[in-house]
Image (spheres, helix red, strand yellow):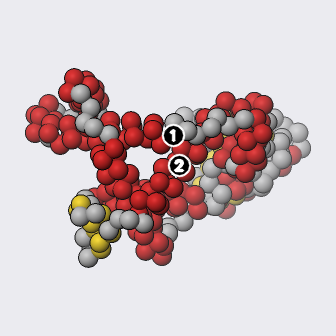
Amino acid sequence: MMLKVNGETVDPDLIDEAFMRIKSEAEAATEVSCCERDEEFRERAEEEVIEGVLLAQEAERRVPEPPADEVRTKLEDSLREWRSHGASWEMLEKQRDQLRDETVARMRMEKFAETVWADLPEPDEAALREWFGQNEDRFRKRARARVRHLVRFPDSDPPGEYRLMLSVRERALAGEDFATLADEHTSREDKQTDLGWIEHERLLNGFETMLFSLREGEVSPVFFYEQCLHLVRIEKLEPEHVPAFEDIRDEIRDLCIADRRREALHQLAVELRQTSEIEKA
């Protein structure tokens, strides 16, 4: 599909990049493939790119090209950054004109955005608390556990390995030190049994599901995961929580301002679209 915004042909790669990012974010949030939503993600990517092009075009209309010395300084900074990521000087020289154009466009957009944001009011205490109440999930800290772990590989004798794990669990429940038992019976070559702190990141992961169904100090049942038999003990458990407003006020302020700025640019793009020509072929 060919997309034009006010006669300007949009690079399809921009839409593809936005599509992959939006889809990856959705899949990371749900831990499942979202192929059936590809059409939705593609539409969102197109709208995002159209909005960006409209704002870039408006920036070009309103903001004159920056002085040559400022452009040169910014361009050299960009070239050094590309070099730090492994780009060769030969490749960068071939793309210097394109990189310069991108630098000018970015500088224009930065100055343009500053003018859009100039009249935005500073959020007061009441506004920050209201915003925090509406966005608590963005600050939610995952539950995490300090875990001691015993693993056995039941390749040669599954029944025997299972009975051994049951025996170890019974001994731990009877009062023997689980760390000592784990160190003695683990099948790991490195003898590592202290997993440290594990965050509850993957809601559908079998190992984490077991971990975070336990109470602090509790030894798990024997369970099978990724071709291994496992026993775990929760040494320390920190439940999921949202920090107090007072503890993260500065972070709240920064994110609140960032949200207001994004919304201001979005509303401007909505207005620009009303008088723009969008062609899809």
* Label annotation for residue 264: 2
- Quadrant of the frame with the N terminus: bottom left
> On the rendered structure, is 71 left or right of 263?
left
Q: CA distance from mark 2 to mark 1?
A: 7 Å
Label 2, secondary structure: give it.
Answer: helix
- Quadrant of the frame with the C terminus: bottom left
Between 68 and 102, the residue placed more toward the observer is 68
Q: Is residue 247 visible?
A: yes
Residue drawn at x 78%, y 31% as measured from the top left: 246
| Residue 253, above or below 80 | below
Place residue 155 in its image quadrant: bottom right
Residue drawn at x 38%, y 65% as measured from the top left: 275
Mark 2, Cα crowd under 10 Å, few <14 / some 14-19 / many 20+, is: some
Between 280 and 241, the residue placed more toward the observer is 280
Q: Give the mark nearest the N terminus, 2 or 1.
A: 1
Q: Is residue 149 visible?
A: no
Q: State the residue position of label 1.
A: 117
**Residue type highlighted by circle 1:** Trp
Which residue is most to the right?
174
Is label 2 in contact with label 1 (beta carbons under 8 Å)? yes
Label 1, secondary structure: give it.
Answer: helix
